[in-house]
Amino acid sequence: MRSADPVEAAPAAPAPPDAEPAGQRPWSLYILTALFAAVVVLRGPLTRLFDTPATQTWATVFVSIVIQATPFLALGVVISAAIAVFVPPSFFARALPSRPVLAVPVAGVAGVALPGCECGSVPIAGGLIRRGVAPAAAFAFLLSAPAINPVVLVSTAVAFPGNPEMVLARFVASVVTAVLMGWLWLRVGRADWIRTPPRPDLTGMSRWAAFWSTARHDFVHAGGFLVVGGITAATLNVTVPQHWLTALADNAWLSVLVLAVLAVLLSICSEADAFVAASLTQFSLTARLAFLVVGPMIDVKLFAMQAGTFGRSFALRFGPATFVVAVVVSVLVGSVVL
Amino acid sequence: MNREAQSVVLFLLGGAILRISATDVYLRYVKAGLRPFLIVSGVLLVVIAAVTLYREVFAPARPLGEGDGGSSTGAHAPAPGHAPAHAQAGHAAAHAAPHPGAHAAVAGDEEAPAPPGAAGNDGDGHAHGHAGPRVAWLLVVPVFAIFLIGPPALGSFAASRGGTSVAKQSDYAPLPAGDPVTLPVLDYASRAVWDRGASLTDRRVRLTGFVSPRPGGGVYLTRMILTCCAADGRPVKVGLSGTVPAGLPADTWIEVTGRYDPRVDKDRANDESIPYLAAEALREVTQPTQPYEQ
């Protein structure tokens, strides 16, 4: 690789005027050191706080969400950094149809090619937009990739041995939702809702320097929001009792809504959600389909990561819209296929 | 959070992940199959941290600072070398005050590091364009949790909150040889509930799990099953009839030998059936290396 070549300036993201001149505040390191000293000093009270069953379970669930997501997040930021540094924008211009209306379904189906769960696809979608891919197409990819890749489809088939049509229903409903959301963005989306955070300025850097710098920035950034989502999901996990749900399972319409909301709250990895759905036997198959379609597209962890990657005003609009479209599509597909 | 501190936090997180995957501790949180990926990503994080930190310290002749091309960034070339100039201002009270440095024109000086746990910062931070660096402080939370708390595997608290999870299998092959035959708790429960114990009659089985309280008195032998991580952990419960010592504390790991008992409980959480085992012998054991099944 021509590692000595300077990288051309990133074309896509508009430069915010208040970009961070990091490196100018060496006290970050002092604060970090002081923080560690404080935690070591307060170790006794801290460990006592995490000595009750509820707080221990909270900590276990929180740590496991972060641990589970880290390999996928690392894969995602490496791909995203490679897109930013090594893949010329002209590649995407050739690979995707030039008309966004056609690029959306192509990008949606291309999600099949990314084996992983939803944590990795957020930085990748951000990287695609910075590289000049139409946001609508990048969002279709963002929504479909975690739901329709081979790993997830196989685990769905394993979880529902008696209902192979569940795999088909999940695939169809996820692709349709992703494409509809892409087209919806083309119709009503506004570019100024998206606000990608400042990224390291790569101008004049060697390719590898730019690669490492981007990978670090993207990881601490998306990882920070992963922690926000993990804290939220772990808190809901230990506070919302499951038997509340059982009472609502008998009403056909309500049950769909309940499982869709549960998918948002639990923030389960898309490779695992089929097994959880399979265990919710008191709910109808259509309700469980909604659980499988909504979960990989929008949950509290993803909402935090999307808000961090694309901006809060984007996430506040895109998240609820995704939820509504996913639920409606799940009911329609479920009534035909299941 | 500045670039050096970002590298340090990445290094710590990578180190924490390598540490738990070097021993069996990671099995409390995720499935065994994830171990190679954990090791690869832990090494990758450490490498990213080392390479970027090396560049900050030994290759400071970078043309530009971090930031998407703000016109002022070019003036701040030396990154790590000027610490003494800021040192006296660098403590708690200082970051809210305007910083008297040469780069005061840049809005970045208002960055206020968030204490870990202050989750409310994320949205607000973004409005000022500093979400990335600021939210990065939260990455110290999992590092502290792993190194200081070391949360245990899911136990009776999680088991009592979740409904028993008994997957139906397509067919039930005859039990393997052995007397008693050692079975996964999930396998026993599935045969007992969906096959009505047909493949269990006249056999002694041995199950290992932890004690969780039964509503209304008594105990369940419970094992959590995991698909990806502890967030999707679900309990499988088996009631114990026969000779069960009173006063077994919750979360005690036990090994029970017994025979199929057709009695069934309904789990309050999800109306699923909880099968029974007529215990003939029970002894306390240490927690298995693999605390979860499946």
Image (spheres, coloured by chain):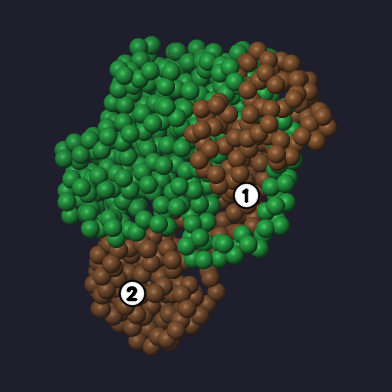
Residue A123 left/right relative to A245: right
Residue type, numbered disc 2? Pro
| Residue at (59, 54) in percent of width and height | B145
| Residue B78, quarter of the rendered image | top right
The chain letter corresponding to green is: A
Task: Choose top left, top right, bottom left or bottom right for residue B187.
Answer: bottom left
Q: Which chain carries label 1?
A: B
Measured from the top left, where is residue A126 in percent x and y? 49, 26
Q: Quadrant of residue B179?
A: bottom left
Q: Which mark is residue B143?
A: 1
Badge 2: few (under 14), some or many (20 or more) residues near its Cα, within 10 Å?
few
Residue B11 place in picture, x, y as percent: 68, 42
Which circle's residue, 1 or 2, is located before the other in the chain? 1
| Residue B243 horizontal/vertical position (percent) | 38, 88
Secondary structure of the residue carrying numbered label 2? loop
Mark pair 1, 2: CA separation: 37 Å
At label 1, the amino acid type is Val
Q: Is residue A14 visible?
A: yes
The residue positioned 70% from the left and 39% from the top of the image is B93
Per the image, the residue denoted by label 2 is B215
Tint of chain B: brown
Host chain of mark 2: B
Q: In this view, does A97 lie above or below A24?
A: above
